[in-house]
Amino acid sequence: MLRTIPLVASWFLCGCVVSEDTLTPVDQTVIIPNGISPNGISPNGISPNGISPNGISPNSNSSNGVSLNGISPNGISSNGTPIGVAVSGAPLAGASLVGSTWTGYLSSGTTVALRIDAALQGTGANTDVWSYQLSVSADGTWRPLCLDPAGNPIFADSVPGSWNLAQGVPGGGSYQPETAEFTVACRGSAIAKCVELGYKPWTGHVRELATCVRALRGDYCGDGTPYTVTGTLVNIYDAAGIQSDGATWDPEAEWTPSGADCISKKREARFSQVANEVPWCYPHALKSKISCGTGFTGDVAIITELPPL
């Protein structure tokens, strides 16, 4: 399973795509090495076993559902010297972090040890993105923090800020870029996928990142509740020109950092096509508009499209 983790730090440590449920995972078999297909289409989606919004299974660290809430801003390098987090760019950067250990905070009030085991620098437009394999110490045994569907360790990207992990409440699923926390997102998760699509906070695209995560998760009502199914392909493009509209698909919705601004038609929305569940905000706050998905107005940052029925 893929997982994302918000990590506490004094400094920010830190196309077509698929829809996601939580801030979560996707089938790794369809993701190419840089996490994005040449035309911007990549399959993603929600976890079939209900992974939490931060991408970490509630049971990944204990049998009691204890979750990892954050990490100390100060770590220890492989040679035993103190190290801190990056003050610019991606929160975690560089191969020198391999072997370093950090202290993670659990929701139970206890702590857990984390270790960086491997580093991988992105390519092309993502050379500023470093991915890491991390392990967590549980019951005296080091275990991979991020896993693919086959149970193999995978890398994670680091992102400044944190996400509200709640669902079905005001503010659920929202991005807080100015907090003293950073997030580690397993590759293939909504957050990592959006970063690798080019929506990087350190390049001035905070608004696009927040919107992209909402869009991939199908968080129409902007309360953290996803309405999508794993493997659902979505064409995503933006007003900033980072991802262009490269598919002749049907408009689905217009998106802001607060959720969907409108949908084109009920039958052309993922909640109708694949989730088979109508969001509570439709059709009262969220309405269908014939013009939805034909242009960028107001706070709309991203438009999604689905393959023609």
Image (cartoon, grey):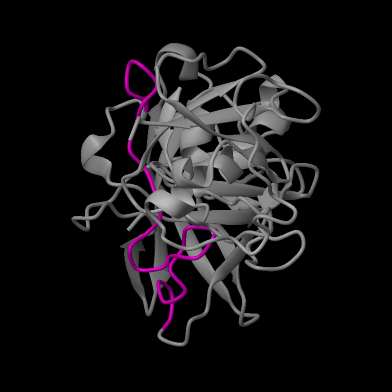
- Judged left or right of residue 298, residue 164 is left
Give the extent of the magenta segment. Answer: 36-62
Instruction: Out of 147 and 141, give the one closest to the viewer.
Output: 147
Numbered label tally: 0
- Judged left or right of residue 41, residue 78 is right
Q: Position of residue 267 (x, y in %)?
A: 45, 46
Residue drawn at x 80%, y 43% as measured from the top left: 178
Quadrant where the C terminus lies?
Answer: top left
Q: Position of residue 107 (x, y in %)?
A: 62, 76
Instruction: Out of 221 and 268, give the one closest to the viewer.
Output: 268
Is 182 colored magenta in this rendering? no
Q: Main secondary structure of the magenta part?
A: loop
- Judged left or right of residue 56, residue 274 is left
> Can the viewer see residue 14?
no
Up the image or down, 56 lies above or below 146; here it is: below
Up the image or down, 82 lies above or below 137; here it is: above
Q: Position of residue 194 (x, y in %)?
A: 52, 33
Which picture quadrant has residue 92?
A: top right
Up the image or down, 193 lies above or below 154; here it is: above
Residue drawn at x 28%, y 33% as measured from the top left: 31
Residue drawn at x 53%, y 73% as measured from the top left: 67
> Can the viewer see residue 43?
yes
Residue drawn at x 63%, y 59% as measured from the top left: 224
- Residue placed furthest toward the bottom: 64
Quadrant where the N terminus lies?
Answer: bottom left
Q: Position of residue 206 (x, y in %)?
A: 71, 32
